[in-house]
Structures are given as C-alpha cells and as structure tokens.
Image: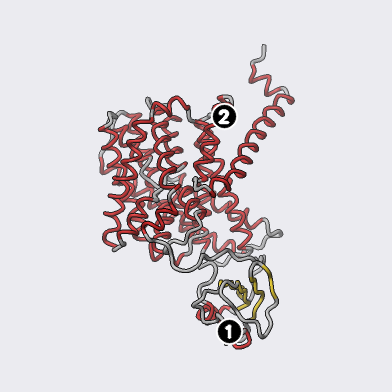
Amino acid sequence: MMTSAESLITDPVAIGWSIGWMLSVAGALILISVIFSRTSEKIGFPAVLLFLGIGLAAGYFLPLDFANFDLAFRIGTVALVLILFDGGLNTPWKTARAHLVPASILATVGVAGTAVLMAVAGYLLGLSWIEALLIGAIVSSTDAAAVFSALRGSGVQLRRRVGATLELESGLNDPMAIILTITLTSALIQGGLGHPLHLVMDIALQLAVGLAAGLAVGWCGQKLVQRVRVPAAGLYPALTLALALLAFGIPSLFMGSGFLAVYVAALMLGNKRLPYRPGILRVHDALAWLGQITMFLVLGLLAIPSMLASAGWHGLILALVLALLARPLMVTLCLLPFRFSAGDTAFISWVGLRGAVPILLASYPVMLGVEGALEIFHLVFFVVVVNALIPGATIRWAVQWFKVERAGRERPPPVLEINAQEELPVRILSFYIEPAALVTGIPTNELPLPEGSDFLALVRSGQVQTVKSDTVLIEGDHVHLLVRPENMRAIELLFGLREED
C-alpha cells in the first residue's frame, strides 16, 4: 500500500495540484502585500511590518506545511543577500568613505555592547546567561531591509552624515549578529561557552575572510562587467546577480561572513561605470523588494499567536530596554569620538530598526532543535514587532524633533532614463537645478559649456521640452547633458550635484 508521499510522487495530478496550490497562495500573499504597501505608507505604518502581519494572519489559516523553519531560514538567507546587494549598489563611495569609520564601530562594538546589555536584561527576567546572551545577539543589529525601506520610503531628506551612517551601519552589522548567534547557539547545544579569546578570534577571522572575499569578488566583478559583452541587455542583471551569489557563497565555504562580502562587493560594483546601469539598478531594486516581501511573509507564517501572546510582557520589557536604554547608550558611546550632535546621535539611536533579520536568526536555534528555542523565537518576534512599530512609524516626527533634515527641497528621481549596452565615448550626466546653482535663471546660450558638451533633454514639471538657445533654466528643472569625461568637473561646478550624488 502506497503512502501519501509515494502517491504524490507517482500521481502527476497530485503534483500539479500541490504546485498550483503553493504558487497560488504565494502569489495572493505577495499581491496583497504590494497593494496595501501604499496604504501603510500614507498612514505612517512601516511596510515591512505590514508584510510580517500578513504572513502572521495567513499562517493562522494555512496548513502547517507552510510553517517550515528550515525552508524559511534558507529563503530568508537568499532574500537578505538580495537586499544587501541592492543596498551596496546604491551607496555612493564618496559618502560611504566619509562615514565608514563611525558606521563600522557601530556595526561591531555597538552590536556587541547592545548584545551584552540586552543579555543582562534577559537574565534579570529569569533566563539563563547563555539564553539571555543568545537573545541579546539576535536583536543586537539593526535590519538593513527595515532601515533602507523606512528611510527611502519616509519622503524625508536626512543630513548626509546621519543618513549615510544609518544605512552603512545597517548594511555592515548583520555579519556580527550572525556570527554571535551561530556561536551562542553552538554553546547552547554543547552546554557551555568556550574560551572568550576563541570567540573573539573566530569573529575576527570570519569578518576578515568576508571582507577579503568581498573585495576580491567586487574587483573581479568590475573587470568582468566592463569587459564582457552579452547579446541581450537583460543578461547584465543576471551577471550581477551571479556575482552577488558568488560573493556570499565563496567566503561561506571558508568560514567567512558571506553577508559582509555581499555588501562590500556591491559597494565596489555600484561605484564603477556599468553598462546598462539603470536597468541593472532597476532589476536589483525589484529583487530586493521581492526578497523583502517574501522574507517577512515566510517568517510571519512561523509564528504561533498563542505563544506570541504568552511572550508579551517579557517581549515588551526587552523591546523598551532595547529602544530606550541599550541602543541609545551604545550609540552615544560609539559616536562620542566623532562629535556627532546630540540630535544626530538621538535620531540614530531611535531609528535603529529591527526587522526580519532578528526573526531569521531566531529561527536558527529552532531549526537545530535547541531546547526552549521556540519560546526564544516568539520572544524575539514580539521585540521586533514593537521595535518596528514605534520607531518605524515615528520617523517623520523624529526628523522634525531632532532637527536632522537636510535643508532644501527634496530631489525627485530623474524623469528621463537612458540605457546603453556599449560604453560610450561621452558621459550622460543628470542634474536637478537648485536655487543656488550657478546656472539658475540664465539662458542656455549664455552658459560657458566646455567644448563637446551639449544639452540632451530638459524635463520641466514632468514634461520633456526642447532646449532652445533662449531657454532659461529655473529651479526644479531636470537637465541631461552629453559631456566628455575630461569636462565633468567643469560641468559639476556649473550645475551642482549630479542626480546620483
């Protein structure tokens, strides 16, 4: 007599029905998430928390087959790779270089210190030291998906120092939290921690291997993308996606941090001239959003409402300790040597959002069958929900309260995009005309453009207009120019910051 599993394998109708059922559910959940994301943005509700809530609600009605910790961890890992790679591609190196040191200290010393403070709070609530340290490690890092989504979707312009530090920290601190979580989970299984020196050396080794692998893949990727010519433009994003997977996979085979390698490789690639650049960035942006939605939905399916409710009080206390004590204290200590203002420090402390990564890390002990891991998972889940809900929904208020908004009008994205598969002998530069720009209010025929430079298009109020000799440039215009590489600096002196700056 065949079992149900055997009949499923031999019955093509059952196979088709099973696949159709799973894809239909996945499609419906993603569709609902996308449709309601706009509503959540309007009311100030974090979109990532919406995705998590939809997954939690769906898990109440769906069969237990959808709540698979092992599968969720693997899906979440791939999704996080896509999110970190997209974040690195969109981080200008000039900005990153200026704020790399404080962000790196927050991502290492800040994470370790937050983990210790949270462990003390957990121990006072009755957890063992190893369990408390594990929870502290899991919730110690800010979440790249939550931070990128909240900052870019809030519609505010942060001062460059504040925004860059937050985004760099969130992209760099996941490896530290992951290393601590894996190490402490092993300690729970083995019944005790090893020598502290061994832990420090292991962390340093994983970070060093990850950094070296990221630099190597990024450098090789730069050469490869610039030299290889593919038959179709759509293959360029496939090429960069392959580099993202290699950046994660190679160091992981040698006990290195794949997540750090992915972010570093993307940072190197994103700051070099790429063929079909707008298309590459657009595809990776879509992949990052898809990964973000999928990760939150899948992790939401894992939670059991009754266990969430039982973790409520302890979770609320830990969330408050994290938001009001541990994170602010460590951020203040880490940023003290860099003379950040009190408002900047307070805002960075408040917007250290947690998201899917802590929940993903909390699924790791459950996956390995650690005793009491399911209770830890729901405790972490509750902490993340509270942390994402309160700071995430108050970003606009915090920007005004702490006075961290950049002066000037918000720069809308370019209306005109130009894609080229082959490298051109000229550069196409885009500028948004600010009131203080030298060209504002001047007819185009009076501008001292370098030889070989010319206007490609002018976009005003969303409409493409012909640039005539007597066209006067006004505030809010988008201008696109053809420029020889040697004349770029002269053009930037006239027009100001380029769109990608």
Residue farthest to the right, as pictured: 13
Left or right of 453? Residue 318 is: left
Q: In the rendered image, which residue does mark 2 sit on?
A: 66
Residue 25 figure quarter: top right
Say which of marks 2 and 1 sits in front.
Answer: 1
Which of 39 and 117 lies nearest the eye of the viewer? 39
Q: In the rendered image, which residue does mark 1 sit on?
A: 442
- Ranked by sequence position, the earlier of labels 2 and 1 is 2
Counting from the top left corner in percent of width and height, residue 28 is at 64, 36
Left or right of 462? Residue 166 is: left
Does any portion of residue 256 appear in the rendered image?
Answer: no
**Quadrant location of the N terminus in the rendered image:** top right
- Write the residue at 35% across / 31% down: 313
Colour theme: secondary structure
Mark 2 surroundings: few (<14), some (14-19) or many (≥20) residues within 10 A:
some
Q: Give, as a three-letter code, the residue at label 2.
A: Phe
Which of 403 and 367 lies nearest the eye of the viewer? 403
Which of 471 and 315 lies nearest the eye of the viewer? 471
